[in-house]
């Protein structure tokens, strides 16, 4: 919680619509002690803010903390990572030539199992929170592991570091190694209830951390477990996260494991298996969705389930190129997921960049598809929408975070680009611009495009969640 009322001054950039960024220059945003935006004023310098806006709010001018974006800097909403495995962070970049099912057995399950060691869990979870915050991720939908104490620790660390999060204890009671599997569907449900109870004790109003029911994916969950988790979601109104149609061998496995005669579904599609178990709700976050059929996409859309697009992971472990425009055209809400460590990067900016590039591969005919249409390309504006407002909708935080509007919470990052002086050097004292060199003649949309394609954590100068400063670049 921020201890002071705050006045932010300068340029603010945020999404107004899927394909439109709004640029507010010479603007003032007032954030109260609870972290809520209470005023957004344009054409408002510090003097005007002090003379008119602060008195109108009844704020003591001397008590207000002022944060100003300098030349070359702008405020941008914090990123929302709609899908990542906190427990897999030490493995980012380590995937060799594997594909999903062998990758899970070779790299992933052994690491996740090892995090039942509390010392190791603290080390890894502390680092993943600090690292993602440093890249501007103000909200993360985390998968932890099957272990309840270390999942609880992840919750506690999110709260102490101030990162907004959905935390899911992973459920898996079949087709996983003996050393890393729930003993039964009942045991999995009981452990899930225990981790939910911990979160509700730690953050009773779910102001920062929320539980999320997490059946790992259909192959690793028995039908009784999926049905019990579906019932739990109905009972608690909590969100659900899982994986869907990431890889072709995985899809074949699901067809084998869950025939309609067992599920009672009308067909053997992956989406129908989840639907029959009550797992396809308007609060379900489906990661990947690379190979959905037309009928599955229609079902996902009808249930108003959401999709987390994970382009870094889909390329790294050779899963395929998801057709985001097609999903959006179906009316499906999409956000972005780094999907560490199938994904190799902790950065949502990198993920947005890869979303833009993968959409071009869709146009060029990747994924065994005929070349797509030009309009399948995602623009800079569109991928940044997915990274912020789209992500907010995916995790059920629309209207609360993802933009700069009165009533929303201040989850934001201060972005700084390298302003190049006449001598060809970066201007300003500490101002490292990383790989983003701005010469001064670029339009604002061009500056943002340069940030998207060349930016990294060197450009993320400060990060706030709910008004609290949670990261500052040294
Ligand atoms: O990218 C992925 N990462 C995982 O950990 C996982 N588990 C099931 N399916 C998965 N896909």
Image (spheres, helix red, strand yellow):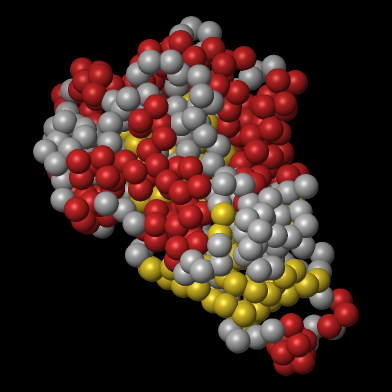
Tell me where residue 146 sits by quadrant.
top right
Residue 121 appears anywhere in the view: yes
Q: Is residue 234 visible?
A: no
Location of residue 105 in the rendering, given as x and y in whole percent from the top left corner: 44, 12
- Decide if residue 70 is on the left or right side of residue 190: right
**303 on left or right of 473:** left
Q: Quadrant of the N terminus?
A: bottom right
Question: Looking at the picture, does residue 474 appear above or below residue 120?
Answer: below
User: Which residue lies at the image location 81% right of the left edge and 71% below the top edge?
Assistant: 65
Marker count (numbered):
0
Residue 44 vs 373, above or below: the answer is: below
Whether 164 is drawn above or below 347: the answer is: below
Depth check, front residue: 303 or 349: 349
**What's the residue at 69%, 17% (across, down)?**
117
Task: Give x and y (percent) for residue 11.
Answer: 60, 72
Residue 245 spot, x, y in % from top left: 28, 32
Report which quarter residue 49 is drawn in: bottom right
Residue 30 in the figure: left or right of residue 453? right
Q: Residue furthest right?
A: 62
For the view shown, which residue lies furthest in the front direction? 423
Return the residue nearer the eye: 323 or 35.
323
Residue 19 left/right relative to 265: right
Residue at 31% over, 27% down: 319
From this viewpoint, which residue is outermost toward the top? 178
Measuring 85% from the left and 83% from the top, which residue is drawn there? 60
Residue 226 lies, with reference to residue 62, above or below; the image says: above
x and y, in percent, of residue 266 in the image = 13, 35
């Amino acid at each position: 919680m921020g201890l002071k009322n705050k006045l932010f001054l300068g340029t603010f950039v945020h999404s107004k619509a899927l394909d439109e960024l709004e640029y507010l220059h010479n603007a003032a945003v007032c954030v109260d002690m609870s972290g809520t935006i209470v005023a957004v004023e344009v054409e408002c310098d510090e003097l005007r803010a002090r003379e008119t806006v602060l008195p109108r709010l009844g704020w003591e001018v001397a008590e207000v903390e002022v944060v100003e974006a300098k030349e070359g800097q702008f405020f941008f909403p914090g990123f929302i990572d709609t899908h990542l495995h906190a427990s897999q962070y030490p493995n980012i970049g380590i995937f060799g030539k594997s594909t999903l099912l062998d990758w899970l057995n070779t790299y992933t399950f052994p690491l996740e199992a090892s995090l039942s060691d509390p010392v190791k869990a603290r080390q890894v979870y502390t680092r993943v929170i600090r690292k993602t915050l440093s890249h501007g991720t103000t909200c993360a939908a985390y998968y932890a592991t099957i272990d309840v104490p270390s999942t609880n620790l992840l919750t506690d660390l999110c709260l102490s570091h101030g990162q907004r999060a959905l935390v899911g204890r992973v459920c898996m009671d079949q087709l996983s190694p003996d050393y890393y599997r729930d003993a039964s569907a009942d045991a999995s449900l009981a452990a899930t209830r225990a981790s939910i109870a911990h979160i509700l004790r730690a953050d009773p109003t779910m102001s920062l951390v929320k539980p999320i029911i997490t059946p790992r994916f259909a192959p690793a969950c028995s039908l009784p477990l999926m049905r019990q988790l579906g019932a739990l979601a109905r009972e608690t109104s909590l969100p659900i996260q899982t994986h869907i149609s990431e890889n072709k061998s995985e899809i074949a496995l699901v067809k084998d494991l869950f025939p309609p005669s067992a599920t009672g579904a009308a067909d053997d599609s992956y989406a129908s298996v989840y639907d029959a178990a009550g797992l396809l709700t308007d609060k379900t976050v489906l990661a990947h969705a690379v190979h959905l059929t037309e009928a599955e996409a229609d079902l996902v859309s009808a249930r108003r389930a959401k999709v987390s697009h994970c382009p870094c992971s889909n390329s790294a472990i050779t899963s395929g190129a998801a057709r985001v425009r097609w999903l959006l055209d179906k009316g499906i809400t999409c956000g972005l997921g780094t999907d560490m460590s199938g994904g190799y990067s902790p950065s949502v900016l990198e993920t947005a960049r890869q979303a833009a590039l993968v959409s071009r591969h869709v146009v060029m005919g990747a994924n065994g598809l005929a070349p797509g249409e030009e309009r399948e390309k995602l623009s800079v504006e569109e991928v940044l929408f997915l990274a912020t407002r789209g992500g907010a909708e995916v995790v059920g935080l629309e209207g609360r975070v993802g933009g700069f509007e009165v009533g929303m919470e201040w989850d934001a990052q201060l972005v700084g680009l390298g302003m190049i002086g006449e001598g060809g050097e970066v201007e300003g004292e500490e101002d490292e611009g990383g790989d983003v060199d701005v010469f001064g003649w670029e339009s604002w949309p061009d500056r943002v495009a340069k940030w998207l394609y060349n930016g990294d954590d060197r450009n993320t100068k400060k990060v706030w969640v709910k008004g609290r400063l949670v990261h500052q670049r040294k």
